[in-house]
Amino acid sequence: MTVSGKSKYALPVFHENFAKAAAAASGNDVLRAVTTSAALKKDGGRKKILAELPDAEGLRALAKQIKSHVLDNFDYYLAQFADKVRAAGGVVHFAATAAEANQKVVNIARENNCRVIVKVKSMATEETQLNAALSAAGMTPIETDLGEFIVQLAEDRPSHLIMPVMHMNRQQIGKLFAKFFGVPYTDDPPTLAEMARVYLRDRFNVADMGVSGVNFGIAETGSIVICTNEGNGRMCTTRPRVHVALMGMEKLLPRFADLGVFLKLMARSASGIALTQYTNIITGPRRPEEHDGPHQLHIVILDNGRRRILGSEYRDVLRCLRCGACLNACPVYRTIGGHAYGTTLPGPIGSLLAPLLNGIDRHPDLPQASSLCGACLEACPVQIDIPELLIHMRRDLAAGAPPSTPAPPHPTTAWTERVLFGMWTFMLATPWRYRLAQAFQKFFLRHLASSREGWISRLPGPAKGWTQARDFPVPPERTFRQWWKERRP
Ligand code: SF4
């Protein structure tokens, strides 16, 4: 696993050839099966549980309004949050880049003589590649979320925002555990989970420092909120003597009362459950009268390109909660999985954020990685209009607007497209030409439809790209016009 040009990218880039990676991933039947099944299950759970709320749409609109209000008054709430954290005994650090954030965490660890560091799952630390920085400084970071722990053992990378090992099946995990723990192979999920639990329990006992992300930072009280389902968040943030939280600066909420809106929406959207199993609300480090909790709480507030986005027409992406609902709803993500996107943020939201943070010239394919079906917008708890923003980005890409340097169109594609669109325009110009084209197309496709009942598995010529990853439906015997003519009184 390599990250190219870490220092110059805001998001780590694992590869830049989306088209090639997507084609390979869509041809991987095992990957497609596990990704599709897990994503559809989560997406179905989200729809079902949101339908049980009396006014889910009203709640989503309110969440959007609160987040937009924070973005409109960003400096005010950021300053208020920092003041309140300090007043509660915490230490606030500001990091302009991923490298700066990592350096600050390493410095805190060094100053406090911390060697073993337990981590809660966090997209911000994935964004900065904190584990690599800690390891390079001679420390031992240990992921304690089961999925992230598996990713770390496999020296792999997450393929989903909240289900990091979505791309692996239990047989693969069983083999990995047998090798790591030196035990006989099993793919029984409770047995595998128990092995990890016993191993991690020991690590919690010896860890000097806990690192977490932040789901919400509340400006009114200086509290940070960390939502987990495995209880490891509570272990990481209470047991070690130092707690460092890495927080993307867009995670702010104005008031404590706003939290309820987001807690109601986030778990439902992410996992199809009413509430995460553990919701930790932390305000400052351990107080003298308290028996547990860290002696120090450091909050590192990460910019890493967010302020640049705040001043652009794409600012709505800063409402993102990293819930992963748009990934589960997206037919493109379900077909190719997360690794094909080439960065730590896959799926529809990643298709926006990677070009915004790293430059469109690095990811010219990602704005096209969507059918614009609108499923991501429908799924998003804070109503980010991802399709609309992707269209804006395609416009920027076509116009060569800063910061993009669009790749020139492939000459063959450009030539083929011109001929095909020319023919299309000619055929649509008069009704009789359209009918003729329709009859020809029907004859042509029905003649090809030999491989499978009702479906064409392989189209010839330039159309073959369509059937590389999906079948094409055979046109029905009668056209709609014929059907309508027969039914009309
Ligand atoms: S864009 Fe919306 S649905 Fe996608 S991860 Fe962010 S909050 Fe969740």
Image: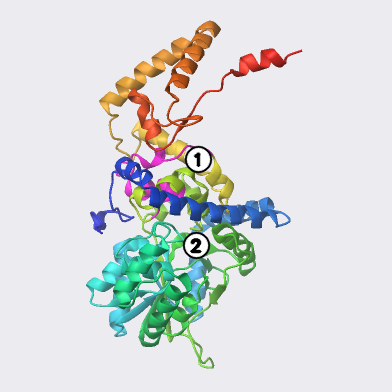
How many other residues sit within 10 Å of disc 2, few (<14), some (14-19) or many (≥20)?
A: many
Quadrant assignment for the C terminus: top right
Q: Which residues are magenta?
A: 345-373
2 or 1: tag closer to the N-terminus:
2
Residue visible at 56% across and 73% down? 279
x and y, in percent, of residue 158 in the image: 38, 60
Q: Nearer the viewer, mark 2 or mark 1?
A: 1
| Mark number displayed over residue 251 | 2
- Do tag 2 and tag 1 residues touch (Cβ < 8 Å)? no
- Secondary structure beneath label 2: helix
Separation of disc 2 and disc 1 at Cα?
Answer: 23 Å
Residue visible at 26% across and 59% down? 1
- Secondary structure beneath label 1: helix
x and y, in percent, of residue 377 in the image: 55, 45
Disc 1: which residue: 387
* Residue 436 sits above or below residue 238 on the image: above
Q: Is residue 310 visible?
A: no
Residue visible at 36% across and 56% down? 344
Residue visible at 34% across and 24% down? 462
Residue type beneath disc 2 = Lys
